[in-house]
Image (tube, grey):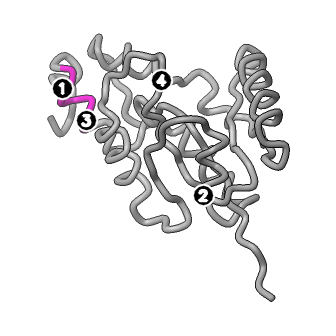
Amino acid sequence: MGKEERIAIYPGTFDPLTNGHASIVRRGLQLFDKVILAVASDTPKTTLFSLDERVSMAKEAFKNEPEICIEPFRGLLVDYARERGACALLRGLRAVSDFEYEFQSALMNRRLNADLETVFLMSDYRWLYISSTVIRTVAELGGEVEGLVPEPVVRRLREKYPKFAEKGINA
């Protein structure tokens, strides 16, 4: 009898993907056999990048890591997790302010599917102050975000924001 593959889902908007997100995914592989980065299509947030763009950037960022799967999803996360055979949801925490929202979400997901665990990983200290919102704002105003996001994201931000592109080394 073979060992059952342990799959975790790391859901989010990823608008855009940051190095903090990438760190959580890669660290999740120390606990799980496979991590699915699930890019949410249903979000109350207004996104800078389309769903296809967000999926494409993530696929490019993890292109040489076959144990990381990138997929769009819609609907209830617990339904998607069940369809994909996941045993856990992977979530990152940067600060105490993240905890209340994540705790509420974890409890609701647990109520909807008692077999689905939520695993929280603390962000690496290098990424504590980084969020997708901060990255978008800094890039829009022409600030430098290289080293804070994967290279495919830097390229796409340059396409979206002329001020940022003007400062780019490879623009």
Distance in Å between CA atoms under marks 1 and 2: 39 Å
**Labels 1 and 2: the sequence-earlier one:** 2
Instruction: Decide if residue 63 is on the left or right side of residue 86.
Output: left
Distance in Å between CA atoms under marks 4 and 1: 28 Å
Q: Which mark is residue 43?
A: 4
Distance in Å between CA atoms under marks 4 and 2: 20 Å
* Crowding at mark 3 (Cα within 10 Å: few <14, some 14-19, many 20+): some
Instruction: Decide if residue 36 is on the left or right side of residue 4.
Output: left
Name the residue furthest top: 141
Residue that badge 2 annotates: 84
Query: Which residues make up the magenta segment?
Result: 155-161
- Tell me residue 30's x, y (percent): 72, 60
Q: Main secondary structure of the magenta part?
A: helix
Q: Nearer the viewer, residue 20 or 112?
A: 112
Distance in Å between CA atoms under marks 3 and 2: 29 Å
User: Where on the picture, by quarter, is residue 7?
Assistant: bottom right
Query: In the image, which is nearer the foreground, mark 4 or mark 3?
Result: 4
- Tell me residue 158's x, y (percent): 21, 29
Identify the amino acid type marked 4. Answer: Thr
Residue drawn at the location 51% of the way across and 39% of the way down: 19
Residue that badge 1 annotates: 165
Q: Nearer the viewer, residue 151 or 73?
A: 73
